[in-house]
Image: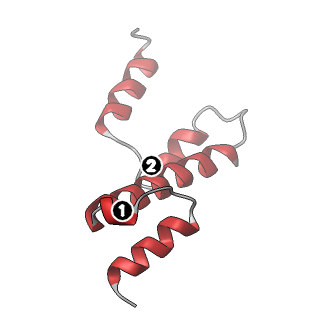
């Protein structure tokens, strides 16, 4: 099986809709990566105890989904700056 066919199979498996003749391997790969990142983030936050304020933050950091923007926002919240 070719790498392209593996990408197509994975994209179809996760339910992405696309025209095989009009999408590049890079576009498919990015779409799959985005789906997997968003899915992992959603599952991490869904399984979190809502009573723990830091739970979502810690899970996002653990999964590598934490960004510099998140850090700035978190710092503003901790410091009480709006």
Using residue 43 as the reference point, say whether residue 38 is left or right of it.
Answer: left
- Say which element carries label 2: helix
Where residue 82 appears, as percent x and y from the top left, is 41, 8
Name which residue lies at 53% across and 48% down.
41
**Residue 21 x %, y %:** 33, 65
Q: Quadrant of residue 55?
A: top right
Res. 19 image quadrant: bottom left
Left or right side of 21 for 41? right
How many numbered marks are there?
A: 2
Residue 81's place in the image compared with 14, above or below, is above
Query: In the image, which disc is placed on residue 28?
Result: 1
In-front residue for pair 9/44: 9
Q: Residue at x 32, y 32 (%)?
A: 69
Write the residue at 71% across / 35% down.
50
Q: Relative to 17, is 52 on the left or the right?
A: right
Q: Quadrant of residue 48?
A: top right
1 or 63: nearer the viewer:
1
Q: Is residue 18 above or below residue 54?
A: below
Residue 26 horizontal side relative to residue 66, left or right: left
Under tag 1, what secondary structure?
helix
Q: Is residue 40 above or below residue 79?
A: below
**Residues packed near mark 2 inside 10 Å, few (<14), some (14 to 19) or many (20 plus):** few
User: Dot 2 corresponds to which residue?
Assistant: 61
Q: Is residue 49 above or below residue 11?
A: above
């Amino acid at each position: 099986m070719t790498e392209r066919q593996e990408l197509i199979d994975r994209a179809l498996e996760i339910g992405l809709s696309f025209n095989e003749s009009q999408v590049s391997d890079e576009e498919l790969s990015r779409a799959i990566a985005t789906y997997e990142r968003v899915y992992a983030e959603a599952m991490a936050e869904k399984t979190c105890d809502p009573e723990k304020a830091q739970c979502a933050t810690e899970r996002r950091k653990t999964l590598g989904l934490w960004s510099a923007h998140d850090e700035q926002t978190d710092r503003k919240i901790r410091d009480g700056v709006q």
